[in-house]
Amino acid sequence: MNKNYPFDPVLKRHLFIASGLFLWVFLFLFFTEPLDVSELGFEEKLMYLPVYALVAALGYIMLLPLQSWVYAGNDKNWKIGSELLMLLAFSLVGLLSVRLVYLFVVVPYEPNPYTLIYFITHIYLPALLVVLPIVAVGRYGLGRYLEKKQEEQKITIAGSGNYEGFRLEWKQLIMVTSADNYVEVVYTENNQPKKHLIRNTLSAVASDLPQLLKVHRSFLINPDHYKYVNSENGKWELVMIHDLKCTVSKTHLPEVKAALNFATN
């Protein structure tokens, strides 16, 4: 249950799943004719069946704040258990919503509506077995697509010789520093700074990743994470995100000024 699961946290993209759910539920009810749909005429089907479809789509949308809360509570990691929780919540919300629509929209004056047990076992569960896999596959596909896009955007900080490199997203990388025969990659993960040692030289990393800015013989920075600059007694220091600091040498100061757009006296 602790394994990471493919997941897209962007709520607006889940609206595509809700839209697909609306269409799928409508077509499923229209052609399979549960819920006494066979007794409805064509115009009545067009009147009542979109209500069920809309309820299913809105039920999914209503759960998105819960999804965001669970995601934030897991330090922006999504587990298999989290996904199962969302599917269970969707199933329960769907049962309540569909039952209410059946009682108060489809058969409001029917003296003998289906009992709850019969409704669940003979109508809702068979429908859920058709609808739920579509939701699960849609969510999984959305997560896998995001993972693929993120993987394509990753950069590699190579290790020398047979030593393993390190892959990460550009936006995660804060700086690379020299550490004897190694370089120390400083990056952010789950909004926390972390470090990773790789056997290589700073000059080799600078050659492989020219988008990094050299500010000192021992520092390469990701200029996207620069916050501000400090100057004291003629010495310059850059402050990065998470208040990480690095020295700017006089040799690289003109280039750094131009790249980061700050002035010196």
Image: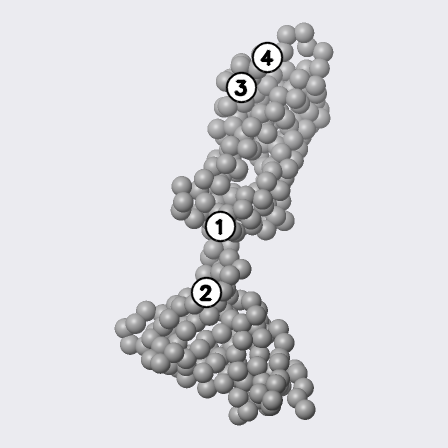
Q: Is residue 185 visible?
A: yes
What residue would you read off at disc 3? 120
**Of discs 2 and 4, which sits in the foreground?**
2
What residue would you read off at disc 4? 114
What residue would you read off at disc 1? 77
Q: Amino acid at mark 3?
A: Ile
**Of discs 1 and 4, which sits in the foreground?**
1
Q: Amino acid at mark 4?
A: Tyr
Dot 4: element: loop
* Residue 118 percent coordinates (x, y): 53, 14
* Picture quadrant of residue 99: top right
> How far apart in space, not on screen, are marks 3 and 2 (Cα)?
50 Å
Identify the mark nearer the N-term, 2 or 4: 4
Identify the mark nearer the N-term, 3 or 2: 3
Identify the mark nearer the N-term, 3 or 4: 4
Q: Are marks 1 and 4 in contact (CB under 8 Å)?
A: no
State the quadrant of the C terminus: bottom right
Q: Amino acid at mark 2?
A: Lys
Please give the label number shown on residue 61: none
Q: Are marks 3 and 1 in contact (CB under 8 Å)?
A: no
**Of discs 3 and 1, which sits in the foreground?**
1
Identify the mark nearer the N-term, 1 or 4: 1
| Foreground residue among 219 and 96 | 219
> How far apart in space, not on screen, are marks 2 and 1 (Cα)?
17 Å
Q: Amino acid at mark 1?
A: Asn
**Of discs 2 and 1, which sits in the foreground?**
2
What residue would you read off at disc 2? 194
* Picture quadrant of residue 196: bottom left
Q: Residue furthest left?
A: 162
Q: Residue at x 62, y 84 (%)?
A: 231
Q: Residue at x 51, y 71 (%)?
A: 174
